[in-house]
Amino acid sequence: MTSIDRLCIDTIRCLTMDAVEKADSGHPGMPMGAAPMGYLLFDRFMRYNPRNPAWFDRDRFVLSAGHGSMLLYSLLHLSGFDLPMEELMEFRQWRSMTPGHPERGDTPGVETTTGPLGQGFANAVGMAVAEAFLAATFNRPDGSHQGLSLVDHHTYCICSDGDLMEGVSAEAASLAGHLGLGKLICLYDDNDISIEGSTELAFTEDVARRFEAYDWHVEMVEDGNDLSAIAGALERARRDRAHPSLICVRTHIAWGSPMQDQAESHGAPLGEENIRQTKRSLGFPPDEHFHVPGEVREHMAQAVTRGRQAEDEWQERLGRYREQFPEWAALFERMVAGEPPDDWDADLPVFGPEDGPMATRNASGEVINAIKHRLPTLIGGSADLAPSTKTIMEGEGDFSAQHRGGRNMHFGVREHAMGGIVNGMALHGGVIPYGATFLVFSDYMRPAIRLSALMGADVHWVFTHDSIGVGEDGPTHQPVEHLMSLRTIPNLAVIRPADANETAVAWRIAVERRGPVAMALTRQKLPILDAERYPVREGAARGGYVLAEADGDLHVILVATGSEVSLALEAREVLQAEGIGTRVVSLPCWEVFEEQGAEHIDRVLPAGVPKLAIEAGVTLGWERWVGQDGDVIGLDRFGASAPGGTLMEKMGFSVGNVVERAKRLLEA
């Protein structure tokens, strides 16, 4: 280690101590121990442009151990990203660019929101998948040494003991090894400490052997301060393009301080006197805060020059690519910008009553296969349920170690990892990713769904078997609380379409909307609403609409979603025949409906008219639309094992019960 290397590394340690102490909150231990590996990545191995953090062919860096955020903030600041020292001084404060855990969108250079352990690791796997797929899709030979490679970068990740304890990382690592993601390199900060104390309390497995069993390239570095050893391991990892790499680096939490190797240094300030002692031992002014030596600034500033040169070379290749492959270049640039082609929906199917009855999961499958040709970066799959979720793109091949251009992902029975991986694919950019499973198993991936919403990631979640209509599989497979549970997540659009045409609209919303979308689709067949009779397509695009108006005076409104919409239409016929003017409102997406504004909402659901909601899920939350004086036919219990039609009848989803409840509501 050279003197300038040591000075840079110790600067990171001192910035960390000062920021956590000033905030009186944070995690100083991990950044102090992992500072050498972080510095080495940013100084010698990673390719990035601090002046353009969004440059597409940059290497991606994921700090899965997000509690060590000051490691990343220090590196970004010193490397020339737009993260001023004043922001480091405002660590963990209101509206600062340095939140307690890295948050995508708050800080230039932060690729993903991390902190819930294991999620960043899975995101990194997804980024590596996206890189491999886009390289296979867009890169072209042109006779030169490099060819016209628009996509050729690595994904680096620093993970902790806690990350590797979490099940999501085990799922993701297993799949990454199977896929042979050779441009994924993870450094394991092996410091043997977690919040409760030594990892001997609960984590004594041989991590290296576990990852070897996953078919990863594994390296061991016994001294986390040995830059030469870490660099050698990184070089060997970069040469192995057939396997993802795990570099186990033995570190010491809060290295160099009196609190070294103590669990208390994990998540609390070190204290002023401990910081002074540490700075003295490192040769830093003990009473000077946020001190960066001039030599460090000069050395780290070289990242800006390197980054500008790397991007310039890439821009030159992109220029030659435009000349030789203008159509592919135009598509590449649109997809990188997150803008689908103007005509992407030209083949979006329109279904007629004669095409039904049709389960909305089947309609979704038809939509996917109709739009795939105009969206060549649409890629996704299921957690071992593709035949049931209808998410296979026919004729597009499987993404695998042997076929990087395949568009069908097979995640295996790994719902949680699927969620984190699909998030990583979306965050990488350039692809339109989707992940599918049964709605009831959204519970297994809820942390990833929540993070997709928190980050505003353009992810498409396809959840089928959306109600007790699943039938004989019984209550373990019948979602009851799941729709409402997903609706409680801010920034997540949840769409439960009533028929095939509303399903096509759901996909239109998903492709064009910024942020995640979750579709809840039926297993059972549903009638296809006559689009010439009902304003299905234009209405569904607004999230909620009047599907069928009352004949004569309006007495009651039936509000329904999904499979219960056709039930509401049948009940309307009976009520109308008895002289009760009944409107039917289809409300496939609460979030989009609310975005339409008060005028549209009041027109569809006018005040003063009794409202009865019908949905095969928990009733909690429906008072938002029906009011305190309204009523809800729903399920505040678990399902049962029986044919789906029988269950619906027994649990109140019948024409007779809807009619009776509507009359009772009017009497009240």
Image (cartoon, rainbow, N blue to C red):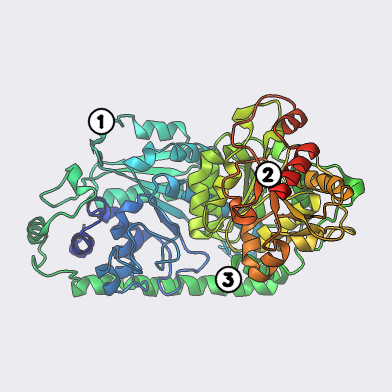
58 displayed left or right of 146: left
Which class describes the residues within 10 Å of circle 3: few (<14), some (14-19), or many (20+)? some
Q: Hey, what amino acid is under mark 3?
A: Arg
Left or right, 666 with reference to 529 = left
Residue 64 image position (x, y, % from top left): 39, 50
- At mark 1, the secondary structure is helix
- SS at mark 3? helix
Residue located beneath label 3 in the image: 317
Q: Which residue is nearer to you in this view: 332 or 617?
A: 617
Q: Residue at x 56, y 63 (%)?
A: 145
Would residue 432 be seen by someone viewing this image from the given angle?
A: no
The residue that appears at 30% across and 66% down in the rendered structure is: 93
Residue 617 against residue 506 in the figure, above or below? above
Residue at image mark 1: 201
Q: Which residue is mark 2?
A: 615
Q: Position of residue 125 (x, y in %)?
A: 50, 47
Q: Is residue 668 left or right of residue 656?
A: left
